[in-house]
Amino acid sequence: MKINTINKLCCPFDKQDLQLKILAQDTGKNVIEGLLSCKCCSRVYPIVYGVPIMAPDEYRQIQVEQPIIERWRIEYKLDPLNLLPG
Ligand SMILES: [Zn+2]
């Protein structure tokens, strides 16, 4: 996904701007892997295979997302991240 497109996204819960952390890009500067985080509600939305995962809490598959975050944590030396607040 293009950075310009990602920058237009906002948090689905509180409509606040999201901070983008790019982890991997392809040769066309598309973001392949990254993290979108909301300062307001401290949710984190991963970008996986170029697709931001921004479903409401009840539809998010944390058991699917958690291993990705865990891999990134090691690969990109990220601080531990909570996918959902609380
Ligand atoms: Zn938010």
Image (tube, rainbow, N blue to C red):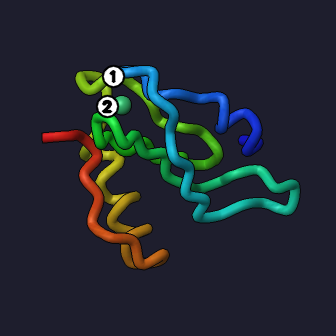
Secondary structure state at the residue bearing disc 2:
loop
Figure quadrant, ligand 1: top left
Occupied quadrant, residue 79: bottom left
Whether residue 72 is situated above or below residue 41 in the rendered picture: below
Secondary structure state at the residue bearing disc 1:
loop
The residue positioned 33% from the left and 22% from the top of the image is: 56
In percent of width and height, residue 83 lies at 28, 46
The residue positioned 35% from the left and 48% from the top of the image is: 65
- How many marks the image carries: the answer is 2
Q: Would you name the residue on which mark 2 appears?
A: 60
Check whether the beta carbons of the residues at disc 1 and disc 2 lie within 8 A of each other: yes
In percent of width and height, residue 40 lies at 33, 35
Residue 30 placement, left or right of 57 = right
Whether residue 10 is situated above or below residue 61 in the rendered picture: above
In percent of width and height, residue 41 lies at 28, 35
Whether residue 29 is situated above or below residue 55 in the rendered picture: below
Front-lying residue, 17 or 36: 17
Residue 63 placement, left or right of 23 = left
The residue positioned 35% from the left and 21% from the top of the image is: 13
Task: Tell me the amino acid under the disc marked 2.
Answer: Arg
User: Which residue ends up furthest to the left in the rendered image?
Assistant: 86
Tell me: is circle 1 under 8 Å from ligand 1: no
The disc at residue 74 is none
Q: Would you name the residue on which mark 1 appears?
A: 56
In percent of width and height, residue 6 lies at 65, 37
User: Which residue ends up furthest to the right in the rendered image?
Assistant: 28
Dot 1, how many residues are within 10 Å of its Cα: few (below 14), some (14-19), or many (20+)? Answer: few
C-alpha gap between disc 1 and disc 2 = 6 Å
Front-lying residue, 73 or 40: 40
Q: Quadrant of the N terminus?
A: top right
The residue positioned 37% from the left and 45% from the top of the image is: 44
Q: Which of the two discs, 1 and 2, sits closer to the camera?
A: 1
